[in-house]
DNA sequence: TGAGCATATGTCAGACATGACATATCGTCA
DNA sequence: TGACGATATGTCATGTCTGACATATGCTCA
């Protein structure tokens, strides 16, 4: 996906379910964004279930609070690599990651 | 994973199933490498099933033959983002990607 | 053997991701 | 209301990824 399009997404304050409807995303781009959001949502889910703060998670990941916030927001500056590493570090299995990606969560 | 460790992996000519046994990988690192290899293997599978050359795939991906070769080899210079984008562009669905990641292929 | 195509490997400039910091916004409790 | 903890947003230097190129290796067929 080109940065210009990702920025358009950001500007629109998009959420899953309306991005593809409102913007000119190709099927691959739509799938890519959905996949990234699924990982981001799961990361937040794991964190909140454990009642951890973003700062606490940042410490575990050797990262910063601001980056954790961006991970959970599926910010364009966050790679899938980073999200996957984060999930694995927080205890998710490869199978968990696969399930999260394949699932059709909103 | 640190670059030094990834380079060690490369140097050893590793394959799934023996990396963690021979090298000092943490569980997360092992899962991460396995996940990446699963994607890389699937990419090659899709390509060969269609009887496409790496150059033909490169054209579809707006990339180069050498990078496609590196993708299929799960080279350290290849990100999961790139692999996922490639699979989606070649027609795989988000669900396919999730299944590939979750599956326990050798 | 050697020509020809496919794949692998090494390298690099430019593009992009990362952690960190500063600062803004939100929520809640006194 | 204001103070405080948590989360969000903007920016930047440094490091990593990317496509491209050159070149090497592998494979098949005549």
Image (spheres, coloured by chain):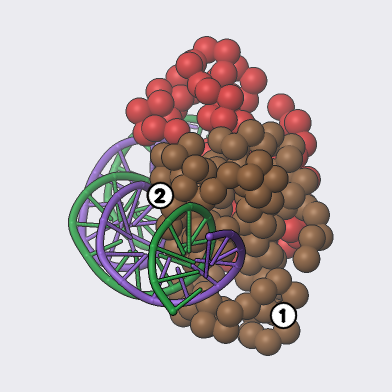
Chain colours: A brown, B red, C purple, D green
Which chain contains the residue that carries disc 1? A
Q: Residues within 10 Å of mark 2 (few under 14, many from 20)?
A: some
Residue D10 % position (x, y)? 35, 75
Residue on which the image places disc 1: A18
Query: What residue sits 53% from the left and 23% below the top?
Result: B26
Which one is closest to the eye, mark 2 or mark 1? 2
Element carrying mark 2: loop
Disc 2 or 1, which lies upstream in sequence? 1
Q: Quadrant of the N terminus of chain B?
A: top left
| Relative to A76, residue A21 above or below | below
Relative to the observer, which residue lies in front, A52 or A36? A52
Q: On the rendered structure, is D29 left or right of B8?
A: right
| Relative to C24, residue C12 above or below | above
Q: Decide if residue B59 is in sight here.
A: no
Which chain contains the residue that carries disc 2? A
Query: What residue sits 69% from the left and 34% below the top?
Result: A93
On whether disc 2 and disc 1 are found on a single subunit, the reply is yes
Residue on which the image places disc 2: A64
Q: Residues within 10 Å of mark 1 (few under 14, many from 20)?
A: few
Q: Decide if residue A17 is in sight here.
A: yes
The residue most toward the right is A104
């Amino acid at each position: 996906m080109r940065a210009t399009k990702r920025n358009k997404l950001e500007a629109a304050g998009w959420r899953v379910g309306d991005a593809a409807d409102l913007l000119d995303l190709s099927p691959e781009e739509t799938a890519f964004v959905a996949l990234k959001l699924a990982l981001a949502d799961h990361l937040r889910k794991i964190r909140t279930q454990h009642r951890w703060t973003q700062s606490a998670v940042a410490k575990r990941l050797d990262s910063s609070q601001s980056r954790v916030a961006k991970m959970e927001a599926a910010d364009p500056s966050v790679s899938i690599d980073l999200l996957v590493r984060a999930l694995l570090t927080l205890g998710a299995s490869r199978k968990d990651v696969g399930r999260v990606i394949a699932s059709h969560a909103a």
